[in-house]
Image: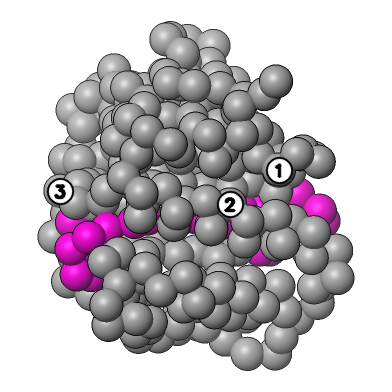
Amino acid sequence: MATTIKEHLETIDNDLAALILKISSIANTISDELPYRRGKADTKNVFGELQLVADKWADQFIIEELRKLGLVKTVVSEEQPDIVPLNDSGTFNITLDPLDGSSNIESNNLVGTIIGIYKEDLPTQGKHQVAAMYILYGPVATLVYTAQNGVHEFLYTKEGFVLRGENMKLPEPGKLYGIGGLRKDWLPAFRQYIEQLEAEGYKLRYGGSFVGDFNQILHYGGIFAYPALIEKPNGKLRLLVESNTMSFIVKQAGGASTTGKSSILDVVPESITQRVPTYIGNKELIEKLEKIF
Ligand code: AHM
Ligand code: MG
């Protein structure tokens, strides 16, 4: 019999296990509801991006479900301008990208939910996470989590989330690269770095959703980046709700992350909306990259 996520969580702290289990059941509902939550919402988020019905619904649904659980003190969400207080007695603080890659909804490409879990008050450095996870709503929904106990992947089935891969490590050497932003806007040194990878046989795979693009690096190895751009030196991805979470997971999987200079997990946030140039993948590729800047 396949191990359920509930069984897998038995070895970690009770409250943290309850929180991750709750998030997994929230993900079940999101996966089931996405077909019915389509279209544009005609509002913009704090980043000036047009919100979709699904973005707003997922944001509100996750926040309300977490409020009911009682274990969460505050949430920082990509769809909320300020820190959202939930329960004064809660012990966890959460970062949330409710529906990442939502511009993929129209074409039915991958989207996902990204969640970082902290005990420290937010904003704080990503290295202070106690757990991190994402859910990928793909042909099959999958959930990946780490509670500093390795990286584990679960498949959404009729029996709920069941174990698919335990203690995952980025394969060495990696095979893929996926880079956001237009190539003409990349910094020249970065362009050369990617041309070198192409010459070595790394294959381009880019889907436009961080969750999907990171997930394939976890499975095949390589590098994902939303790099510094000439006109946007901080790139696009948000430090708190996007980059820190994946950086925490990749480290547990034997990989690394960088801003171009040093680990993303060490960046001291100045605001909850801060963006950061994001390069994530096999350690050796990240070390090589840090030398070009
Ligand atoms: P979102 O959270 O508003 O969807 O934005 C983040 C997404 C990432 O998933 C992805 O890496 C990036 O934006 C893609 O951006 P672009 O559409 O500019 O290539
Ligand atoms: Mg996002």
The residue at the point 81 percent across, 41 percent down is: 158
Residue that mark 3 sits on: 266
Disc count in the image? Answer: 3
- Distance from disc 1 to disc 3, alpha carbons, whole Å, reads 35 Å
User: Regarding mark 3 in the picture, which secondary structure is present there?
Assistant: helix
Q: Residues within 10 Å of mark 1 (few under 14, many from 20)?
A: some
Q: Which residue is mark 2?
A: 24
What is the crowding at mark 3: few (fewer than 14 residues within 10 Å), some, or many (at least 20)? some
Tell me the quarter of the picture where residue 292 sits: top left
* Amino acid at circle 3: Asp
Residue indicated by mark 1: 160
Name the residue rendered at 71%, 43% in the picture: 160
Q: Position of residue 45 (x, y in %)?
A: 52, 83
- Of badges 3 and 2, the one in the foreground is 2
Among the 4 quarters of the image, the one containing residue 26:
bottom right
Q: Residue at x 53, y 57 (%)?
A: 23
Say left or right for 169 vs 3.
left
Q: Write the start and end of the magenta stretch as one range.
A: 101-125
Q: Secondary structure at mark 1?
A: strand
The quadrant of the picture occupied by the N terminus is top right
Point out residue 212 in the picture as x, y percentages from the top left corner: 61, 42
The answer to which of 185 and 161 lies nearer the viewer is: 161
From the viewer's perspective, is 161 left or right of 100? Answer: right
Whichever of labels 2 and 1 marks the residue nearer the N terminus, that label is: 2
Q: Is residue 78 visible?
A: no
Q: Are marks 2 and 1 in contact (CB under 8 Å)?
A: yes
